[in-house]
Amino acid sequence: MSSGSQHNAGGAMAGYLFQCRLALLRGLQMAKKKPNGQISIEKFDDVAFESEDFSKCLMQAKHSIKPKSLDNASVDLWKSLKVWMDQLAGGIITFNSTKFVLITTATASDGSAASYLRAGSSSEDREKSLALLREAASTSENKTTTVARADFLALTDDQARTLLSQVEILDRHSNLADVMTEIEGELILIAPSNPSLAASYLEGWWMGVVGKCLVEEASASIPVQHLVIKANEIGKTIGGDALPVDDPNSLGVKNYSDEDESQIFVRQMRVVNLPDRIVRRGVEDYYRASAQRSKWARENLLLDEELGKYDAQLEDRWGRKFDAEMATVSPAADNEKLEFGKSICLWATQQSVPLRNVVETWITSGSFHGLSDRLKIGWHPDYETIFKGGPGNGGS
């Protein structure tokens, strides 16, 4: 890939992340004033805030990696006007019910059309903007904005004035990184000890919700109340000495594949003839628990040797259970040993041993499988003999 195409791809990705992150920030801010509102991404516009089934505020979000000017012929400006004019022409929204906002990292120089559309602009300022936009629409030769400029020129003066009276330009806006800092500021009260971690977890949840709306429910809106509830939930989980627990589905772990059959922890389950469904669940628990443990480690949330002590606790529990069952059942025949192994494995996968504040069966089960992968524990009475030497030995 050429450096030019890499830059374009990076800019597009930054723009999309900016749009989603900006919606999160504005949603947190909106919650203070209209907690019963709705947020939508790319339903009416890049970002929309709604109530009572119609859009109250439509936002176009434009991000630029390099410094950029929002001049009278700006593509970003004309693209935004085009979107709003199309929605008005289609009857999706009405002139008097909706506020149109262009949020951009670009700068509108003094005396430009966009500069006269900032918040608090007077009617005289908006008249100046109209004149400048009419001139730019007539004289610009930019092919990208040809249709938008023609549509604007087709508006009557009254229609153009009404449109511009509803437009607000927020230029020189915080960039992608700085918006995240502002989100952290919004979360300082619910997570005073670690607002950056709270923001990271909230954004992870938010991206999942937005993705679901875009892919599965393209016209769906997200209640602001859900954002408030999730933010408070995260604040509680990372308060004090608590370990935050991710939604297992958000950890991005790989699904089961035939390649997993070579893993010792999978072979340990296979050697006692566990059903395929249980084996696949075990693989899922293993990868999820590994991902969560790794994330805690990356975020420096673990105390010294905390995971090692937890694994030692699990190993001790397994040992007591294993020895007690061996003394009680004394399996000798092959079928007895298989039933014994099944029983021990199923017992382990149903435990919920606390790891600090975390009591999750999938973490305990996945950690047990991690120990079995290292042959610290096993299910079959003869697991040490069967798997002696590690991968590539026995269990087939």
Image (spheres, rainbow, N blue to C red):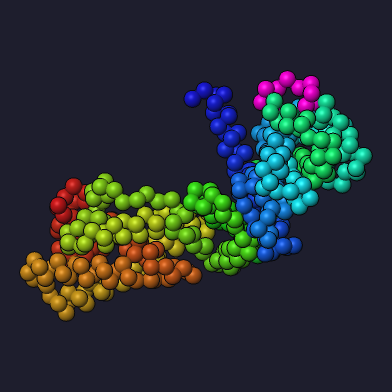
Q: Which residues are magenta?
A: 136-145
Residue at image point 73% right, 28% down: 150
Residue at image point 72% right, 39% down: 85
**In x, y percent, where is residue 386?**
15, 57
Task: Give above or below for 33 relative to 174.
Answer: below
Residue 144 located within the stretch drawn in magenta: yes
Left or right, residue 290 beside residue 319: right
Residue 317 appearing in the image: yes
Quarter holding residue 90:
top right
**In x, y percent, where is residue 179?**
68, 47
**In x, y percent, where is residue 258?**
25, 47
Q: Nearer the viewer, residue 66 or 164?
A: 164
Number of labelled discs?
0
Q: Nearer the viewer, residue 227 or 156?
A: 156
Residue 358 located within the stretch drawn in magenta: no
Left or right, residue 37 beside residue 372: right
**In x, y percent, where is residue 89?**
70, 41
Task: Give above or below for 137 relative to 233.
Answer: above
Task: Find the residue positioned furthest to the right.
Answer: 124
Residue at image point 83% right, 26% down: 135
Residue 200 appearing in the image: no
